[in-house]
Amino acid sequence: MSYAIRLTDVTKRFNGVAAVEGLTLAVPEGSIYGFIGPNGSGKTTTLRMIMHILLPDQGTIEVLGSADTGAARDRVSYLPEERGLYKKMPVRRLLRYYGQLKGRTIAELDPAIDEWMARLGMQGWDGKKVEALSKGMSQKVQFVAAVISKPSLLILDEPFSGLDPVNAEALKDAVLEMRRRGTTVVFSTHDMGTAEKMCDRIFMIFRGRKVLDGTLDDIQAQYGLDTVRVRTAGGAAVLAGIPDVKAVNDYGQMQEVQLAGDPQGFLQQLLPRTAVYQFEVTRPSLHDIFVRIAKPAEVAPV
Amino acid sequence: MKNKALIVAVSEFTTLVRSKGFLVGLIMMPVFMGIAFGVQKFTRNATDIKDRQFVVVDRSGKLFAPLKAAADEWNRAAALATGGVQTQPRFLPAEATFDAGDDQARAQLSDRVKRDEIFAFVEIPADALNPDTKSTISYYSNHPSYRPLPSWIASTLNREILNERFRTASIDRAVVSRLTRRVDLSELGLLARDASGGIKAASRVDRVRTTAIPVGIMMIILFSVLSSAPQLLNSVIEEKMSRISEVLIGSITPYQLMMGKLLGSAAVSVLLAAIYMTGGIATARHFGYGDAIRMADLSWAAVYLPLAVVMFGSIFITIGAACSDLKDAQGMMTPAMLVMMLPWMTWFAIINAPDSPMSVGLSLFPTNAPFLMLLRIAIAPGPPLWQIVLSVVLTAVTAVALVHAAGKIFRTGLLMQGKAATLGEMWKWVRAD
């Protein structure tokens, strides 16, 4: 298998504090790789090192087969978490500028701009200044800026944050289209549902260290069938005091229960207390796994 | 593939010249100059014509009458200009008497001035005509900034006092005037020989050629640098604050980005200078001074201008990269602006003595050289060639050193958020490999 990104024992410190420590990671070519982790856990620092914006203090990073991450610049595109757009610049001029910096000519860029603007429902906006765009529009322009150079590797830092469902859907389709065209996509997200549904592999970083890495199945398999989703007449209150209940995630109408023991034993303890409408033995969701890892400790600022 | 620094330069140039600020600056400078000339022309013919009534206490007993006669003459001749249109105020003296020790009378006259019944009052001492005493005429008014009336009173009374003293001494004033007539000094250039050996007469020194044109050339270069280099600070801070720098650094090296910015800024300066120089040359030709703008001066200006932009641009880029917002930057900008304005504050000294040790020292100092050495070059006969070459070398070395240091500070500072870098931190970045 060939890899778009390989990090080996990478460490990055700021003022002596490790933002990323001993990180080893391999992103297969053509995959969609999700980076998850609490705020300040080291996701953005890792992405910036891959982009050659920051250099690691220790370890090696290989991007698109080159150990010099700077050499791959023209084949890697980056969408930062906080949108980096010139407010006073008209959209097409901005897109051409960013595309030219990736080594493309205007003749190559213009058809790509037209195609992606149309795909994201932004026809006719290319003459407008960026300051006239809504947040969602700006985000889509930033995405277009990242893809018009036809990158081999696309790195997106929180691409879906702050988007309404329609725009989020449009951007999700665009990401999948990039993968169909052979681009490796790495994105960070706080939306576990999106990561579960879109990513071939998921990597979680916590306090600068890798805590999860693999397919969703691999990750969930590590936790076994220790989770039950129940819908009862009594709600979350009836779960109190049942010895097998380790933790409850209350969604109001439904509760996700992490068990210390056997699900059948738990059902027997539950039935005398309330009417049970739904009882589903399942693996923990990514959200649940995330919370189990991140919740017990406070997140250290980086 | 185009050089990426060049792509940045083109973008910076296009953004700057398309900005409203650039267009307004470009158009407003000649517009303001036109307005200034127009206002001057208008005000020359439309000045204050309000009557100035004033009271004169003449204790000499001999000066009020000639003062009144002179005022009548002024009001006839000066106040009524050609065509019968009044362009000056009339001076209307009225006589009063009170003792020198009568402060009550002075206070009453002061009250009349306050009530605008009169404009001022004047006391002429009894011994005003005595050449052996040092007497003083007193002028009282609550308009201390108004000069025409006291100036006219002083010159008129002194003329009459001298006339009276000469009469008393039985000396003919006309003879004295003839004998004491000044001999003027005419300032000339040097004689020159033409190709056939003939001698070309020396021409009179013309202040436009000797001062206005050299200062004009220097000002155009200074203004062009001032208009573009500080913009780099805003550009870098905008890119830092809106995280554009992260996107850019993902595509090009910080050094390419910085060089592109410097190049774009230099191009804007050259464009501005070219526009103003063209306007200046056209104006000079219109007034018959076309030959006073020498090609050699313009060539040196073309050498110094890019050096100045690179030098000051590096400083402003450094400040932008080291600060996290405009507020931080303003504090650090003041010393840089002071350095930039030093030629503006010292050009007078250079004009008065272009070859003095101070002028040589100031014009060799790298941050001044692009402006002050250029000024010295434009003032005949110009500095020795070695001084010009030395100033170019020193400026170029300083520019390269500043670009090198700015590159290192830019590389690190560009991604630093939240706080301004200290001088110690910047020095550490410069020294880092």
Image (cartoon, rainbow, N blue to C red):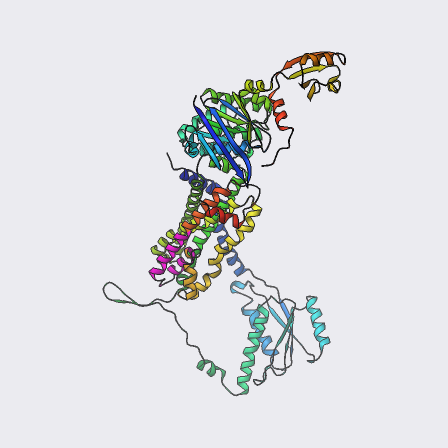
Front residue of B250 and A233: A233
On the rendered structure, is B362 left or right of B334? left
Q: Is residue A246 above or below residue B85?
A: above
Q: Quadrant of residue B93?
A: bottom right
Magenta segment:
B370-398
Q: Main secondary structure of the magenta part?
A: helix
Question: Where in the figure is residue B96, as x and y percent of width and height?
Answer: 67, 76
Tell me the quadrant of the picture where the N terminus of chain B can be found: top left
Q: Is residue A281 above or below residue B231?
A: above
Question: Where in the figure is residue B344, as x and y percent of width and height?
Answer: 48, 58
Q: Is residue B361 visible?
A: yes
Tell me the quadrant of the picture where the C terminus of chain B can be found: top left
On the rendered structure, is B76 left or right of B250? right
Front residue of B284 and B76: B284
The magenta stretch spans residue A148 = no
* Residue lying at the far right of the rendered structure: A273
Q: Residue at x 56, y 65 (%)?
A: B88
